Amino acid sequence: MSDGSSRFAPFLRTLACAWRTHAHAAALYVGQAALPALLAAWQAWRDSPAPRGRLHLVWVARPDEQRTALAACAHPLATQLHLPEAANVPGLLRFETEKEVVSTLAVGEPQSVVGRLGGGFDGLWVAPQHSGIELIRAAGRLMREGGSLVATLTDQAMLQGLRRAGFTVAAPEQASVGQAIEATFLPRWRERRQPPPVAAQWARRQAVVIGAGLAGCAVAHRLAARGWQVTVLEREGGPARLTSAHHAAALHPHVSPDDSHLSRLTRAGHHYALAHWAALSAAGHAVGWHASGLLQAAMSEEEAALQRRTVEQLGFPPEIVRWVTPHEAQDACGAEVTYGGWWFGLGGWVAPPAVCVSQLADAAPNVTTRWNCHVASLRRVEDAWQLHGPAGELLASVPVVILANGGAALELLPRVAMTLSPMAGRLTDIPAALIGGNPASAGWPRAVVSGNGYVLPADARGVRIGSTYETPPQVLSPAEAHAENLTRIAALLPAWRARLAALDPAALEGYRGVRWVTHNRLPHIGSLADEAVALAQAERLRGAHLADLPRLPGLYGLLGLASRGLTWAALGGELLASQIEGEPWPIERDLAGAVDPARELLHRLRHGLPQGLSH
């Protein structure tokens, strides 16, 4: 630490006690000048004898502060805190800087960011320029009892404010304005409606994940990384056989003028997925990510104008998104489009099955898979969940179960207040021979292009386009679906209109899958509500918050990923694992609330409409 680590030894002792006695220790650092303290804790963890739990280091600062601090820091560990261009955009960026050490960069104005964090912390270090009582009070909502605080005394009134916030200040009579103070979070009364989670201490760190698509493989991997023994039960004969089966899918952020929950969650998922896949590749697993970039083309003059205004309004770095003219679009990706569009330089495509296989391989030997295994029923017996097959046979008995099996999850729950609706979609594969040989050499886009439909770069087999959106009772025949895809892409790529129009839709083939979507297109990620108890307490819960709702202990969901499985699965797996372990969350509280599986139940309770919950 900049003042000498011995001066604030209690802070390090608190963290060391946590990582030696619990599954993890977590510390929150606020401001540019907090970097040396963060690195000192990291070094102390490295020097600590094993066994030791995971270390979570969360650093809150503006991006310019983070870059300045890292540029001026000579500590060798600082080189591992790389700042991608995404660090210039408000939000959380998480990555494992080394095995069992997790770094989260919380980008933005500290006062605002701290108030949105989720999870629990054992230590709080606040740089002098941010040591106001309001920020510390907001951070106190995240502090576990016994946690340590280091801050700078701004005035004598701050001492009284700290006591009111639940902190006991060490040697307050010796404290003077401008000096660092130490405090311990030991509230004498209940300060918070919902205390932060403690580091979980499960009697058995065993879990079953139902489903082996993108969602199931992601959460199995993230739990295995924390030392859990995970069994994946899949009714098909292998991983990624249903919705996650197609051989190529696109990944890119989402942009909206108001930077909505959808946009923020998609941006966070995009950057976490890229970091996650890079780690898998570094470990020797062939994920096969193709960083081609992605063009989201405008389909009208009005849409192009909105795209331009949105980019100007958001002020994001061009590395994340920039508006391009038709000429610039053709230079970027070889696509001749009419109105220009958004260029996502960090976009691209990957084969979902390769992601699933890589995750399962990397998680071995902590993950066991059982194929052709159908879970027909699920019930709570004492402190475990029992899973039974179609004939009533016991498949497993574990404390934690994660439903990652799409709409089939509804069959395992007694009543369901969360929407999951099927939406079929068909892709179209066009063999190279049907459009005059190698489409790549004939000017087919060399990057993903989306708009009203999407196209993938060509390979030796040809090109893939898509996709239809078919909601029951609407069901298209294969020929009708291929014709619809051809029409969409002809409007997207005018230079290919004639060649696409000459194709016979009835002669084409392509993958068909079923997406499961929620009422507002945001996924369900988190602990599942105990709806029976909630309905029995409906009157009391009319003014409740999500944290007040009763939950089914040890039962979680990662569901409703719709068309964004690639984007949301890895982040969703990390969020679930963090919640199960009581760790700091990889996204802000309002985003976690927006994807909470209990959100629709809460809406019904608040409006006095608990009846009618059914499959």
Image (tube, helix red, strand yellow):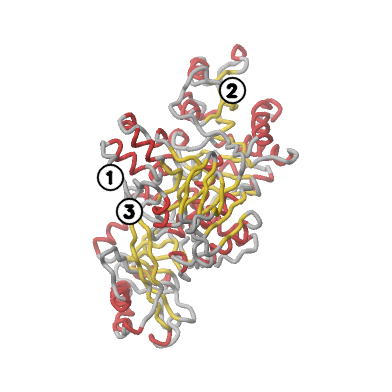
Residue 134: x and y, percent? 45, 25
Q: Identify the secondary structure beneath mark 2.
A: strand
Amino acid type at mark 3: Thr
**Lower position in the chain sequence, tag 1 or tag 2:** 2
Residue 265: x and y, percent? 42, 50
Q: Identify the secondary structure beneath mark 1.
A: loop
Please give the name of the residue rendered at 45% of the width and 82% of the height, measured from the top-left corner. Answer: 441
Number of the front mark, 3 or 1: 1
Whether residue 200 is visible: yes
- Outermost residue toward the top in this view: 173
Tell me the CA gap for discs 1 and 2: 49 Å
Question: Label for residue 612?
Answer: 1
Residue 36: x and y, percent? 63, 36
> Is 163 left or right of 435, judged from the image as shown?
right
Tell me if mark 3 has few (under 14), some (14-19) or many (20+) residues whose alpha carbon lies within 10 angstroms of its own.
many
Please give the name of the residue rendered at 43% of the width and 44% of the height, measured from the top-left corner. Answer: 528
User: Is the N terminus in the top left, top right, bottom left or bottom right quadrant?
Assistant: top right
Tell me if mark 2 has few (under 14), some (14-19) or many (20+) residues whose alpha carbon lies within 10 angstroms of its own.
many
Number of the front mark, 1 or 2: 1
Tag 1 and tag 2, C-beta contact below 8 Å? no
Reply above or below: 22 against 568: above
Q: Where is mark 3, residue-wise?
A: 310
> Is 48 left or right of 318, judged from the image as shown?
right
Residue 534: x and y, percent? 36, 36
**Lower position in the chain sequence, tag 3 or tag 2:** 2
Amino acid type at mark 1: Gly
Count of labels in the image: 3
Reply above or below: 327 against 7: below
- Residue situated in front as seen by the camera: 411 or 603: 411
Tell me the CA gap for discs 3 and 1: 41 Å
Q: Where is mark 2, residue-wise?
A: 184
Tell me the CA gap for discs 3 and 2: 45 Å
